[in-house]
Amino acid sequence: MIPSEIQESIALMLFPAPFSVRRSTPLSGGCINQAYRVDTEDNSYFIKFNHAGLYPGMFEAEVRGLEVLEKTNTLRVPRPILASTAGRYTYIIMEFIGTGKSHSSFWEDFGMKLARLHRNTASSYGLDHDNYIGSLPQSNRFHDSWTDFFITERLEPQLKQAADSGAAGAPLLRQFEKLYRLLPSLIPQEPPALIHGDLWNGNYMTAPDGSACLIDPAVHYGHREADLAMSLLFGGFSESFYDAYQGAYPLESGWKERMDIHKLYPLLVHVNLFGGGYIRFVASIVSTF
């Protein structure tokens, strides 16, 4: 049930009194926050909430990330309305988007729109604010070099956490040091691309009109191959998605061979979120360099 503090806060900040909830329905799929569909007399909303202070700034960063994506006019995202704190809780309220049946050109359309998203660029890699990937903080300090950003803001923080927990030992750390020296020659230089940042098959949905809608962004300006690698990590994306992407914004030759390098970050995130079992996948990748 949605706590009364949250309902009162929403009524006070967004709606003329009285704010009447006709129905609130718990939604599954989230492993971090509690999520509900809320129906009022006039509209439907999606609300996530958690205990205040548990993930500082998570919902505010989500609002900003969704706004960044929305402004590109490429892939649909839920329209964010408000992130705030109410008593013991912090919450986010956004547009509720129902699910539909994908249209016949769903994957081609998805791939082309992702390519259009990636054409949005910036002068540096990073973002003007930090955010989260899952429940882990994600630093987005700016760097002029992709490899510097990838090492300093992505791999090193996760690797340190894995080492501190005992999941990553000294031999693996030495292998990463070797990889760091090779990265500039392994990853092609490209302009920073606006990427979703956590593009696995649980972070898109099919909107009522049959098109793709992105949710739960970990947005930043990074290397666009990172989004493609994340999409391949757990599968679920059609081959026509990649073909359409290639047709709209071709990747440098050898991109499939580089996917494992970009998978290292989400794999380390999984080590730190779900346990050391994922470390063997990390070790198998870095041992090849």
Image (tube, rainbow, N blue to C red):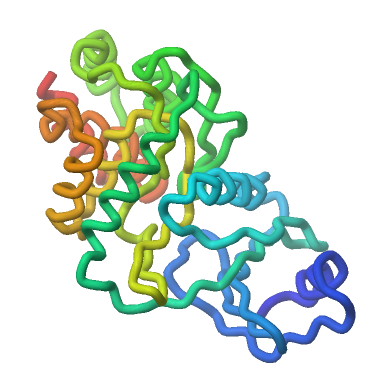
Task: Classify 39 as above or below 28.
Answer: below
Picture coordinates of residue 171, whole percent (x, y): 23, 19
Q: Can you see residue 164?
A: no
Question: Horizontally, is 165 left or right of 243 in the view?
Answer: right
Picture coordinates of residue 92, whole percent (x, y): 66, 61
Instruction: State the residue at coordinates (40%, 14%).
Output: 145
Place residue 194 in its image quadrant. Answer: top left
Instruction: State the residue at coordinates (31%, 30%).
Output: 168
Picture quarter with the C terminus: top left
Picture coordinates of residue 1, whole percent (x, y): 65, 81
Question: Horizontally, is 248 left or right of 48 in the view?
Answer: left
**Furthest-top residue in this view:** 181
Picture coordinates of residue 195, whole percent (x, y): 40, 39
Q: Can you see residue 235?
A: yes
Q: How many marks?
A: 0
Instruction: State the residue at coordinates (62%, 74%).
Output: 45
Task: Classify 80 as above or below 287.
Answer: below
Instruction: State the residue at coordinates (79%, 77%).
Output: 4
